[in-house]
Image (cartoon, grey):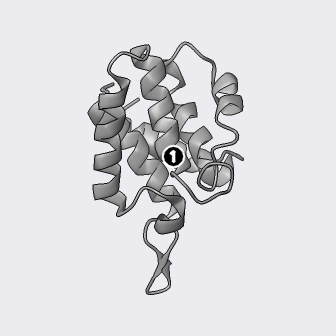
Amino acid sequence: MTIQERAEKAVELKTRGGCNCSQAVTAVLADQTDLSEEQLRALTAGFCAGMGNMEATCGALIGAGIAAGLKTGGKGTLKCTRRMIEAFRAACGAVTCRDLKSRVDGKPLCSCEDCVRNAVRIYGEVVGL
């Protein structure tokens, strides 16, 4: 599956599959880790609406960071995560849920669907698939 196909599947899981943003990202990257999709869903259950509904760091970005840590075994993950944050900010305009959902002309700065799509795509660019 290409990174773009994974990104679109993650969006589908977010919109139709009962997943939060973090769960949707990790679900499509499960094969990049030693954990099952079910284990990743449980692990990332609390990272919705900006970490526990506190409007902090975007759950999609957290999911990408978790997947990167699991794939790299923690070696070089900080560098990967930093690069993902920078790329996510450039693509989405912000990294916190509060800012991403702020309204500009009646629309959010970046929709949850686009955050999920971008997080998966950026994971693929930074970590590699």
Q: Is residue 32 visible?
A: no
Between 96 and 105, the one nearer to me in the picture: 96
Give the residue drawn at x 47%, y 67%: 99
Residue under numbered circle 1: 60
* In-front residue for pair 40/62: 62
Q: Residue at x 47, y 65 (%)?
A: 100
- Please count the marks in the image: 1
Check the picture and name the quadrant holding the C terminus.
top left
Relative to 68, say whether 7 is above or below.
Answer: below
Left or right: 118 as drawn, with respect to 42: left
Q: Is residue 12 left or right of residue 115?
A: right
Tell me where residue 11 appears, x and y as whole percent: 53, 50
**Residue 70, percent across and down?**
48, 19
| Quadrant in which the N terminus is drawn | top left
Which residue is located at x 28 percent, y 39 percent? 83
The answer to whether residue 111 shows anywhere in this view is yes
Measuring from the top left, give residue 27's x and y in whole percent. Answer: 58, 32
Disc 1 element: helix
Return the x and y of residue 104 as percentages of the image width and height.
43, 82
Tell me where residue 74 sits by quadrant. Answer: top left
Looking at the image, the residue that sits furthest to the bottom is 105
Q: Amino acid at mark 1?
A: Ala
Q: Nearer the viewer, residue 82 or 122?
A: 82
Residue depicted at 52% across the width and 69% down the height = 101
Neighbour tally class for label 1: few under 14, some 14-19, many 20 plus, Cα within 10 Å = many
Q: With respect to residue 84, does 77 lie above or below?
A: above
